[in-house]
Image (cartoon, rainbow, N blue to C red):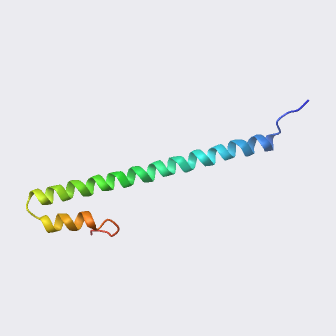
Amino acid sequence: MTAITHTSFYNVTCKICVVLRNALIAFFVGMIALGESAGRARAAAELSRQGYHEEAKRIMLRKDQDNV
């Protein structure tokens, strides 16, 4: 008679939880990046519409830095 021990069952479920956690974290970070990109594009579009073309270009090209 074989039975799954508690430790082996825990190891399997723990691995599943780690994979799910990593997937959810990656999804959350991706959503933040998408929102930031969309906000940056809207701000640049509005600046361009108002005639501030150089400022709009700076916003879109300065992806890595803070635009404080």
Quarter of the image containing the N terminus?
top right
Residue situated in front as seen by the camera: 14 or 38: 38
Q: Position of residue 2 (x, y in %)?
A: 88, 32
Q: How many marks?
A: 0
Q: Position of residue 59 (x, y in %)?
A: 23, 65
Left or right of 16, for residue 6: right
Residue at the far top: name it: 1
Q: Residue at x 33, y 70 (%)?
A: 65
Q: Residue at x 28, y 52 (%)?
A: 38
Left or right of 1, for residue 37: left
Q: Position of residue 13 (x, y in %)?
A: 69, 42
Quarter residue 37 falls in = bottom left
Q: Position of residue 10 (x, y in %)?
A: 74, 43
Left or right of 12, for residue 47: left
Residue at the far right: name it: 1
Residue at the far left: name it: 51
Q: Residue at x 20, y 65 (%)?
A: 57
Quarter of the image containing the C terminus?
bottom left
Left or right of 10, for residue 41: left
